[in-house]
């Protein structure tokens, strides 16, 4: 009975996520969509619960993310992506954008929060030490975006100050995170969605489209 009491409120909390995962982004033209709907929906529900718990744990104890690699940080996001991919029922664009959204959230509430806290402390005490674009970014308290150009420009803006003022161990993860966002959102030619949505692809048109991500 105790288990049922725990599961029911947890299900209510993740039900909006499940509704999006199960019913949103469907590829109606797919001829490969698996027939084992109940099995796949259960897979998504269980992994959705793990994703929710992971985010909740990091929100309540962000310090646990300090020693995580990017792979560890995004593990449950990856698991949900694989689950959705294996159904062959959803558009590539939807799957990758849901993956990006999940990684972005755990990254921001986890390791990035410590770096931004440090930059804000510097902004309050020695604002001249920060570049103009970083100060503008902190003042705006910018929310997440899927705009490729904004992601690229913001990353280029923050990178020097991240390197200079944040934990030295964080720099490599930050670079991997930026590269991964541009990859998952099909910004730079390294990824082409097999079944695209309405969003433009390869917006940045890099000269080297075969550049690899250091850690997926």
Image (cartoon, grey):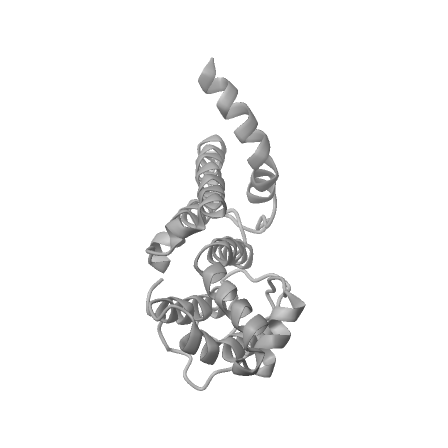
Give me the residue at 49% from left, 18% from top: 4
Is residue 151 in view?
no
Out of 52 and 204, give the one closest to the viewer: 52
105 to the left or right of 167: right
Picture quarter containing residue 94? bottom right
**Residue under the point 46% across and 16% down:** 2
Residue 87 x, y percent position in the rendering: 46, 44
**Position of 201 compared to 112: left or right?**
right
Viewed as shown, does residue 136 lie left or right of 206? right
- Say if 45 sits above or below 24 in the image: above
Indicate whether 173 appears above or below 9.
Answer: below
Residue 190: x and y, percent?
43, 73
Please tell me which residue lies in front, 39 or 207.
Answer: 207
Name the residue: 61% across, 64% down: 145
Furthest residue toward top = 1
The residue sitting at the right extreme is: 140
Q: Viewer-proximal residue, 12 or 187?
A: 12
**Which residue appears at 48% of the width and 44% of the height?**
60
Outermost residue to the bottom = 207
**125 lies above or below 63:** below
């Amino acid at each position: 009975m105790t288990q049922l009491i725990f599961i029911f409120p947890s299900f209510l909390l993740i039900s909006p996520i499940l509704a999006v995962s199960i019913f949103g982004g469907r590829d109606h033209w797919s001829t490969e969509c698996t027939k084992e709907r109940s099995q796949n929906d259960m897979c998504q529900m269980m992994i959705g619960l793990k994703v929710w718990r992971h985010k909740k744990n990091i929100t309540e104890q962000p310090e646990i993310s300090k020693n995580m690699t990017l792979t560890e940080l995004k593990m449950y996001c990856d698991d949900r992506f694989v689950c959705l991919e294996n159904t062959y029922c959803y558009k590539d664009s939807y799957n990758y954008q849901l993956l990006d959204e999940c990684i972005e959230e755990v990254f921001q509430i986890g390791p990035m929060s410590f770096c931004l806290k440090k930059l804000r402390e510097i902004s309050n005490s020695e604002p001249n030490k920060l570049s103009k674009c970083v100060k503008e970014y902190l003042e705006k308290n910018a929310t997440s975006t899927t705009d490729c150009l904004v992601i690229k420009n913001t990353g280029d803006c923050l990178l020097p100050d991240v390197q200079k003022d944040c934990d030295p161990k964080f720099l490599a993860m930050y670079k991997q995170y930026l590269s991964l966002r541009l990859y998952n959102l099909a910004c730079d030619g390294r990824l082409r969605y097999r079944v695209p949505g309405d969003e433009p692809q390869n917006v940045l048109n890099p000269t080297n489209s075969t550049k690899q991500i250091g850690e997926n």
